[in-house]
Image (spheres, rainbow, N blue to C red):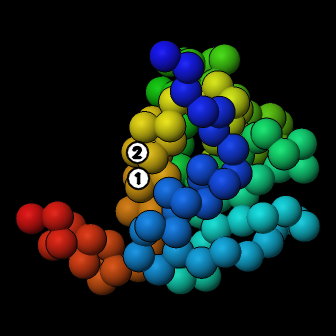
Amino acid sequence: MQREPVTWETVRRIGLDLPGVEEGTCYGTPALRVKGKFLARLREDGETLVLKIGFDAREILLQSAPDVFFTTDHYTGYPAILVRLPRVDPEQLRELLEEAWRLNAPKRLAATRSESRR
């Protein structure tokens, strides 16, 4: 079964489902923030997502799927990974966006999501 390709619109829909996430721009491209803190942005090529995640998670993703996840020298010291949107599985993207949200959302906001899932 052929799946729909993942695009910025997919990222946007998933991101805006998370509490406190708002749209904006970053470096002139569409971006998502949670309560003003950077979460993700589309790179200028229109097919690569910059996603703010922890360094440990980044290393695991880089080793597990180098055809989907990569980085550049620019991001070496920054807790972010680059995601090739046409190659990422939509469910994995959903999980990664939620994890990024948990790491970056204010603790009280993150706690409301945990409570609502019980």
Report which residue position mark 1 lands on.
99
Q: Quadrant of residue 106?
A: bottom left
Q: Residue furthest left?
A: 118
- In percent of width and height, residue 92 lies at 45, 36
Between 73 and 88, the residue placed more toward the observer is 88
Look at the image and tell me whether residue 69 can be seen: no
Judge depth for marks 1 and 2 and give the one in front: 2
Q: Is label 2 in a helix, a strand or a loop?
A: helix
Task: Work out whether 79 lies above or below 116.
Answer: above
Q: Is label 1 in a helix, a strand or a loop?
A: helix
Q: Residue furthest front?
A: 1
Q: Amino acid at mark 1?
A: Glu
- In percent of width and height, residue 86 lies at 69, 30
| Residue at position x 60%, y 53% in the image | 11
In the picture, the disc for residue 114 is: none
Q: Quadrant of residue 52?
A: bottom right
Report which residue position mark 2 lands on.
95
Between 92 and 52, the residue placed more toward the observer is 92
Neighbourhood count class around disc 2 (C-alpha, 10 Å): few under 14, some 14–19, many 20 upward = few
**For the residues bearing labels 1 and 2, Cβ distance under 8 angstroms:** yes
Between 3 and 42, the residue placed more toward the observer is 3
Task: Work out whether 33 lies above or below 53.
Answer: below
Neighbourhood count class around disc 1 (C-alpha, 10 Å): few under 14, some 14–19, many 20 upward = some
Q: Amino acid at mark 2?
A: Glu
| Residue at position x 52%, y 69% in the image | 16
- In percent of width and height, residue 79 lies at 60, 50
| Residue at position x 43%, y 37% in the image | 91
What is the tally of numbered marks visible in this picture? 2
Q: Quadrant of residue 25?
A: bottom right
- Marks 1 and 2, Cα distance to the nearest angstrom? 6 Å
Q: Is residue 94 left or right of residue 26?
A: left
Q: Is residue 90 left or right of residue 74?
A: left
